[in-house]
Amino acid sequence: MSKKLVAGNWKLNGSLQANDQLLDASVAVPGVDMAVCVPFPYLAQAQSRLVGVALGAQNVSEYDAGAYTGEVSATMLADFGCRYVIVGHSERRALFGEDDAMVGRKALAAQRKGIVPIVCVGESLDERKAGLAMSVVGRQLAAVLEVAGADAVGRMVLAYEPVWAIGTGLSATPAQVGEVHAGLRAWLNAHGVAASGVRILYGGSVKPDNATELFAVPDVDGGLIGGASLVADDFLAICRAAVA
Ligand code: PEP
């Protein structure tokens, strides 16, 4: 992969006033692809202020239009210039009941409108302790593959986000990350997906002080950054660490 991708996930944070400062400070770093995934109401604001940094959303409906109160479609995201959308974040799986198949349908819905889904997979702490990390991410990916097919999966971005590392300050070690990322690439190849073209991001407590070692791990093509993406200096430092 030529350039790494670093995507910020603001989650449920922001205000018009605070965003202005953060967006203006989020300037493009040469040598790395950058994106920020903002809450829906701030898409227009972010679209108007970001320069050289791609815009993303944090969720998308599996439906394109109709009687689905509260949903936001991929067509709508495309209207605001979204290049990426996060699907299957562990918070959506755990708190909002999104299952593996729904994640696949959402990823496909985004792709049909030209938006690149960032498909999150990852195991819980109990699953890791039971030695199930790879089988869990394989099951999550298999559902996406079944819905979307190998060609489509080959055009998605994946994010390995161990649930126990998200927002906890407890990042996975480079060895743990390397093992799963290599496993994911092997899984893709074994299932007919051209894995060399798939960016696999790592997410989970990436900070300026651990980004360099995490991005140096083979098969890590960038990062999905939660908390640290809300502090411009930290986000930019992480982006600089991703420059080849
Ligand atoms: C995330 O929400 O995708 C994430 C990785 O969060 P954090 O960086 O805060 O662990």
Image: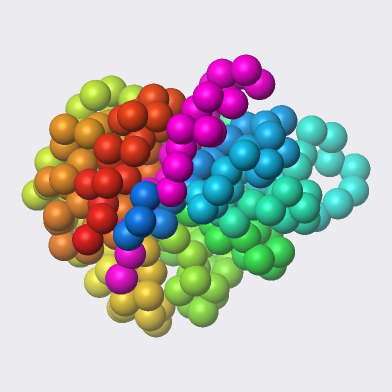
* Quadrant in the picture for residue 173: top left
Q: Would you say residue 64 is visible in this rendering?
A: yes
Q: Position of residue 214 (x, y in %)?
A: 17, 47
Instruction: Residue at 31%, 76% (x, y): give it.
Output: 196
Instruction: Residue at 48%, 77% (x, y): give it.
Output: 150
Q: Position of residue 229 (x, y in %)?
A: 40, 32
Question: Which quadrant is the C terminus positioned in?
Answer: bottom left
- Relative side of 142 to 49, left or right: left
> Given the current orientation, which residue lies at the most extreme left position?
175
Question: Relative to the observer, which residue lies in front, 2 or 167?
Answer: 2
Q: Is residue 204 magenta?
A: no
Q: Position of residue 20 (x, y in %)?
A: 59, 26
- Relative side of 160 to 45, left or right: left
* Quadrant in the picture for residue 58: top right
Q: How many marks?
A: 0
- The magenta region covers 1-28
Instruction: Residue at 25%, 71% (x, y): give it.
Output: 186
Q: Position of residue 203 (x, y in %)?
A: 32, 42
Instruction: Residue at 62%, 60% (x, y): give it.
Output: 115
Question: Relative to the observer, which residue lies in front, 200 or 143?
Answer: 200
